Every structure is written in structure tokens, then in C-alpha cells.
Amino acid sequence: LSPSCSSFQNGLNIISAFNSLIEYVVAMQCIVVVLRVCAVEPVPEGTVVCDQSSKKWKLVELLWQTELDLTYAVCQANQHADSNDCKYMLRLGAKEGHLFNEQNFHLRAAKTDAVEKWLKLHKLDFLGIPSCVGFGLHEAYRFLVFPSMGQTLQTVMDEGNDFLSEKAVLQLALRLLDALEFIHEKEYAHADIHAGNIYINTNSHTEVFLSGFGHAFRFCPGGKHVEYRQGSRTAHQGNINFISVDSHKGAGPSRRSDLQSLGYCMLYWMTGSLPWSQLSQTSSAIAAEKERYISDITGLLSGYYKQKKASGALQKYLSNVMSLQYTEKPDYTLLKAGLHESLQKMGGSLNESLNLQVTHIPIFT
């Protein structure tokens, strides 16, 4: 190279190094922001908070905590109750965190009158959309109040540490499909379906609630579906094992995203594992593994059903939802009919209590 070319190349190298430094600094700043959002310190039990309608709620007991929010058993401040008597639960998180998005979802799409109208229109006995009865700010936090919904499915899975019967999984999926059809009709995708966001009414064991709308996305504002565009949102948002390939790529989640996530959940609940859940992989590697199986449902299931026939209901469901186009409206009736037919063959129905007794993982060889 001539001296002038060499100098030019050195200049390019300096610019490239400078750009890399900028990218690193931006990434570090993003990490700091995320850590600040996730840093939720418990509020002392007995604290009273006031919601937007001036109703006061007393935090009776901290039930559980995640990196993003806290869940308390609460009662109205003028009542005296222990945690077993509390009829309400309160979720508390960062003021500008995911609860802000969840609050907007409930105000726009999940008001009580909208749910009741849907129940009558579709002649349903139950719809697992929680009713937000209060929200507000407390110091640096935002909170939402709901009637008690029972315990999370994740709690059940953790207690048994294994997997559920196919019959129980079909019952869960049918209830969740009812809820998903409702929110999709309201132009929203849930975008983070997993056992920690699913509640089981411990009194009846027939009511299944879909909660945790912190990543909810309005995919069809004003009736016009958003275009598929990778990188339009933060990539890999949600529970990494169960989010859709669309979410991995930073595309706005759509109806197919939720239905594919439910399929991953069903497989995990039936078998206790997923092809990517036991590996220490990067988010991009997990996304690639999921994408590989979109067109290979048989391969996805074969690792878990080597000595027994794979669940026909799950295989049919996955084949249907993995073939959906980004903007395509699913045939919910068809999806539910396939699951319901298999449930009936097992002698089950949606009117009977869920058998959530966790079974030990079989070893398929």
C-alpha cells in the first residue's frame, strides 16, 4: 500500500474501533437501565397504598417476588384480615416498568363490561381474564390490584418439579385459548405466555387465568395489522424458553406468536423439557433452534416420545399454529375442537377440576 492508502486504512480502523466503543457504551447504559427497572425492593407489610379512586389497600403479606415485581396479599385498609382471608392481590413494580404497559392493556382492552359481553356473546361459563379493580403509584412504584386468582401454575410445577398429565394440559390449553381469542379480538397479543403468568383458582381448580400482560403488544391498532419488521421492538423480550421466533427477532408479536408460545408451553408441561431448555445457549442460539423446528414438528416431538406415541392432539395443534402467516387470523374453533376431541376421548371435560398432581419425568430411550 502507498503511504496515502495506508493512512486511509488506519483512519478506517480508528473509526471502526471508535464505533465499537460507542456500541459498547450504549450496551452498558442499556444494562444499567434494565437493572434499575428490575431493582424492586420489598415494601414493608402493613404499608397502606392509595389507588386512583382513593381506595386504600393494606399490604398484608408478600406472597412472592420476581426480578421485576412483587405480589402481595392485600385487603381494604379498613378491614382486618390475615393472608388467608385476603380476597385481593396487589402487584407492585417500577413506576416506568412493565406494569405501566399492563395497566394500559387493562384500561383499553380488558374492562369488566367487555369481558361480560364476550361471555354472553360466546355463551361461555368462564373467561380467564383478570379484572383490574385498582391501580396507582406509591413512591417510586406502580401497583395494580386484582381479585385473588389462586396460585400460579409455576408454583404447582415447582412443588412437583416434573410434568403434568396430558389430560390436565389439554384442559389448561382450552381455557387459555378462550382467553387468547378474547385479547386477540381486542387487538392485543400477550407475548409472554408461561406458567408464571397463569393462575389456577385453588378453590375450584376449574378456573384458569391468563395474567402478566407486561409485554402485551397492540398488533392491530384501529383494525390494521402492523407490518412484519424485525428489530421494531427489543429482541428476546419475555421468558426465553417460551417466546415465539417473532419475539426473538424483535418483530411485533402477533396472534401466531401467542399460539406458538402456548404450543411450547404444552410440550414442556407434558414432558418437563424442551430441546433448548437444558442447554446453556445464547438467546440467538435458542431462537435458531426454535426456527429449525417450525417446519419439523415430528423432529420437535421425537426426542420426548421415542418409546411411546406422541400426543396426537399436541402434534396437530403445533402443525396448525406453526404454519400460520404473520397477519393471519387463526381458526380458534378448529384449534379448540382438536384439543377438546382428545380430551373427551380421555374422559375429561372443562367442567371437572384440573388434576394438577405432578408426575415424575419418564426416561425415554
Image: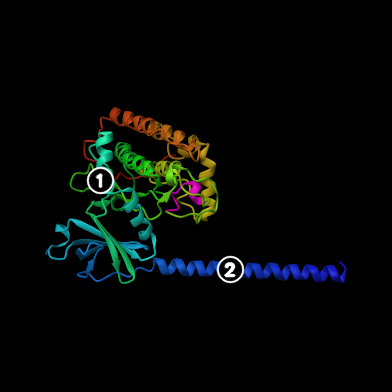
Quadrant including the N terminus: bottom right
Q: Is residue 245 magenta?
A: yes
Coordinates of residue 306 in the picture (x, y in percent): 44, 36
Residue at horizontal 55 percent and vertical 50 percent from the top: 230
Q: Main secondary structure of the magenta part?
A: loop
Residue 253 colored in magenta in the image: no
- Kind of residue at disc 1: Asp
Nearest the eye: 208 or 286: 208
Marker count (numbered): 2
The correct choice, above or below, for 149 with respect to 293 in the image is below
User: Residue 281 versus residue 17: which sits nearer the camera?
Assistant: 17
The location of residue 75, given as percent across then percent down, is 17, 61
Q: Please name the residue that numbered disc 2 is placed on.
A: 24
> Residue 223: x, y in percent?
43, 42
The residue lying toward the viewer, choosing from 137 and 93, is: 137
| Label 2 SS | helix
How far apart in space, not on screen, are marks 2 and 1 (Cα)?
A: 49 Å
Which kind of residue does numbered mark 2 sit on? Tyr
The numbered mark, 2 or 1, whose residue comes first in the sequence reads: 2
What residue does disc 1 label? 113
- Indicate whether 283 appears above or below 78: above
- Residue at the extreme front: 222
Magenta range is: 239-248
